[in-house]
């Protein structure tokens, strides 16, 4: 091993050891003070053309102490020593100039004041030396920082093993900062091929020596292959979701890795580093433009009321909790039977800067909606004015194997809460339903449809019963997105039940917004369906998630088709064949025109279900569900036989 190699390895080991450690600010402050103090002696030497025998060291030392103190105060005010040296940039240079300049102005003003007062002390101080001192101090401070930064990046650069050619979408200030951040990356050597922008006034020009090109020129296979582009970085602040989705999907179609620059408020100390440039999440591709909500309308019916949320620890329930708290109800009762999950939401509220100020409004209640006596006690204690009923079993394959529990919770649990609402004169009851209740092919969907039918039958009384229907919720418990994410992290395979399976998606905040709005507009008896946007093929979603992870399908990770699960269908619907919709004042909320059921028939059906629940014969239970919901036709399930018997009968 030669001397150069040994020295290089030693330097690399030092860089590796200290790459995540930073010089304490007080070290930098002490260094700057030393520079200020010593620079005055050099300044006087320069002023006297280096005739050192003419220097009065004792007088200069006293001046240096006073001047250093003034500079120190200025440094503390401007915090010029607080930057990370290896990332020194224009902002740091400006801070140091401001601090030094302020100190110099204060000293100069003091000297002119002393001279005006004809003080003998002023005669000992050379103004020319102070000007030289100001320039020298700034030069030494910035010079030292630049040397450290350059040395660090030179040594660190020798460790770079990966090379990437990138495009930056956005030829603005954020784009320039993105390019600068990439140049400082110590692990990857980036080459910015071009800035991409739609502004015709910028196209054809150069930005820091790099071309600005239109999207239609660069987003072609010929251009990407010719220039061997690896990555696209989106660097436009507050880009609308629809536009971002279009850009990302174009890039993914060209097999580019896609990253996005976070919003400025998330930059560390107001500075962007390459580590902060993150991968695009699949949720961002499924998002739509933010929903415009009439918050005053929602506030009117929540403010000052006692609000009960069942299933409050679940995905939708906890989302409703976060939003309802902000409308300042008199009391918010969070009811759930899951102790750990309820504790988690309690901890979140206590630790949240936004929600903690409302934490005194929350009451946490562990209880099962199946327990009629416990529900009676809770209603008597808290006297709710509004109920958001989100408690339910929702996993299709599990409920297909456990219809007894599906009926006990989704149907009879809902009946218990609904009956209590009527008995205790609750003003509004908003039920969270699902698109799986439409033309159900599984026990879970059918149980939710029966719950819808029951609550609708109670709507003519004092309590307004409102039902909301929507599809799958991103990142909810059991959602396909976190499942795919875990499978990708493990190296695959990513499993899809069927290549053609299609679902509607919305985010938790979006769904909760619409639930609150629907609750505000409902007068009782309505079933509101939400505009879920475009249906999404689950297979396509899996492909996009793999590509967004920077992996190649078939090479780095496999997609495996495992077949439909019991009760699962290819396409979800929001309305059945006998229903249509009416518009409401909110463009994202439609009112479904649904069949009306005779109340006596509903009561008789529930009596039958009660007897069957006691007998616990699952086939008889499911057969009765099919009788109550004629459109319930099982799919890929052991209960298919019941449909065949109905046809043959």
Image (spheres, rainbow, N blue to C red):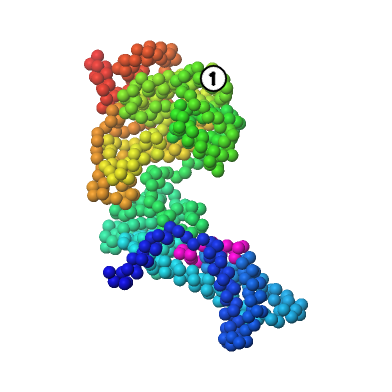
The percent coordinates of residue 347 (x first, y second) are: 51, 37
The image quadrant of residue 472 is: top left
Please, what secondary structure does the residue beneath circle 1 have?
helix
Position of 574 with respect to 56 (left or right) is left
Depth check: 20 or 483 in front?
A: 20
Give the answer, above or below, for where 264 lies relative to 403: below
Depth check: 37 or 444 in front?
A: 37
Position of 134 with respect to 170 (left or right) is right
Instruction: Give the labeled residue for mark 1.
Output: 377
Depth check: 65 or 328 in front?
A: 65
Depth check: 641 or 149 in front?
A: 149
The image quadrant of residue 205 is: bottom left
Image quadrant occupied by the N terminus: bottom left
Point 56% across, 66% down: residue: 30
Give the answer, above or below, for where 506 lies relative to 199: above
Position of 169 with respect to 255 (left or right) is right
Residue 425 in sight here: no
| Image mark count | 1
Residue 244 in sight here: yes
Point 28% across, 61% down: residue: 228
The image quadrant of residue 338 is: top left
Q: Check if residue 109 falls in the magenta segment.
A: no
Which residues are the magenta region?
A: 75-90
Q: Check if residue 83 falls in the magenta segment.
A: yes
The percent coordinates of residue 63 (x first, y second) are: 65, 75
Image quadrant occupied by the C terminus: top left
The percent coordinates of residue 502 (x first, y second) are: 31, 37
Point 54% across, 17% down: residue: 423
Give the answer, above or below, for where 341 lies relative to 614: below
């Amino acid at each position: 091993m030669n001397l150069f190699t040994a020295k290089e390895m030693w330097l690399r080991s030092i860089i590796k050891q200290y790459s995540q450690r930073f010089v304490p600010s007080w070290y930098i402050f002490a260094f700057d003070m030393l520079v200020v103090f010593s620079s005055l002696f050099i300044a006087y030497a320069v002023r006297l053309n280096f005739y050192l025998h003419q220097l009065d060291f004792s007088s200069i030392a006293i001046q240096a102490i006073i001047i250093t103190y003034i500079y120190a105060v200025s440094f503390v005010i401007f915090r010029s020593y607080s930057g990370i040296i290896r990332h020194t940039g224009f902002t740091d240079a400006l801070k140091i100039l401001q601090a030094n300049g302020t100190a110099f102005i204060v000293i100069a003003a003091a000297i002119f004041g002393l001279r005006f007062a004809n003080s003998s002390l002023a005669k000992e101080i050379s103004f020319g030396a102070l000007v030289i001192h100001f320039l020298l101090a700034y030069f030494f401070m910035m010079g030292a920082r630049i040397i450290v930064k350059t040395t660090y990046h030179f040594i660190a650069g020798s460790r770079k093993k990966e090379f990437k050619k990138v495009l930056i979408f956005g030829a603005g200030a954020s784009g320039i900062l993105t390019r600068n951040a990439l140049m400082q990356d110590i692990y990857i050597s980036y080459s910015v091929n071009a800035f991409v922008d739609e502004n015709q006034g910028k196209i054809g020009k150069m930005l820091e020596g790099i071309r600005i090109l239109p999207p239609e020129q660069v987003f072609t296979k010929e251009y990407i292959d010719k220039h061997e582009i690896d990555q696209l970085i989106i660097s436009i602040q507050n880009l609308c979701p629809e536009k971002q989705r279009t850009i990302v999907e174009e890039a993914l179609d060209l097999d580019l890795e896609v990253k996005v620059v976070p919003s400025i408020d998330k930059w560390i100390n107001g500075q962007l580093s390459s580590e902060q440039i993150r991968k695009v999440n699949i949720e961002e591709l499924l998002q739509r433009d933010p929903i415009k909500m009439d918050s005053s309308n929602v506030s009117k019916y929540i403010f000052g009321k006692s609000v009960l949320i069942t299933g409050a620890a679940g995905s939708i329930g906890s989302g409703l909790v976060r939003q309802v708290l902000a409308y300042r109800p008199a009391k918010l009762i969070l009811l759930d039977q899951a102790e750990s999950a309820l504790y988690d939401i309690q901890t979140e509220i206590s630790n949240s800067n936004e929600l903690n100020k409302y934490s005194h409004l929350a009451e946490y209640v562990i209880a099962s909606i199946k327990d009629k006596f416990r529900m009676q006690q809770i209603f008597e204690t808290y006297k709710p004015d509004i109920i958001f009923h989100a408690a339910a079993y929702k996993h299709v394959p599990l409920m297909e194997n456990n219809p007894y529990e599906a009926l006990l919770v989704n149907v009879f649990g809902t009946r218990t809460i609904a009956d209590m609402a009527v008995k205790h004169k609750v003003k509004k009851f908003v039920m969270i339903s699902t698109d799986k209740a439409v033309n159900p092919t599984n026990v879970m969907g059918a149980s939710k449809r029966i719950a819808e039918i029951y609550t609708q039958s109670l709507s003519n009384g004092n309590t307004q019963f409102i039902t909301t229907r929507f599809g799958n919720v991103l990142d909810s418990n059991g959602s396909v997105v976190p499942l795919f994410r875990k499978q990708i992290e493990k190296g695959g395979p990513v499993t899809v039940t069927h290549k053609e399976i299609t679902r509607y998606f919305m985010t938790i905040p979006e769904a909760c917004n619409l639930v609150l709005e629907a609750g505000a507009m409902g007068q009782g008896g309505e079933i509101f369906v939400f505009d879920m946007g475009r249906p999404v093929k689950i297979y396509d979603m899996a492909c996009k998630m793999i590509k967004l992870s920077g992996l190649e399908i078939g090479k780095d990770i496999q997609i495996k088709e495992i077949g439909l699960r019991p009760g699962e269908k290819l396409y979800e619907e929001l309305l059945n064949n006998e229903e249509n919709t009416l518009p409401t004042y909110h463009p994202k909320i439609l009112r479904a025109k649904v069949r009306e059921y005779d109340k006596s028939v509903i009561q008789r059906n529930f009596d039958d279900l009660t007897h069957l629940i006691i007998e616990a014969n699952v086939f008889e239970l499911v057969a009765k569900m099919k009788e109550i919901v004629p459109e319930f036709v099982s799919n890929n399930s052991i209960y298919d036989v019941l449909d065949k018997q109905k046809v043959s009968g």
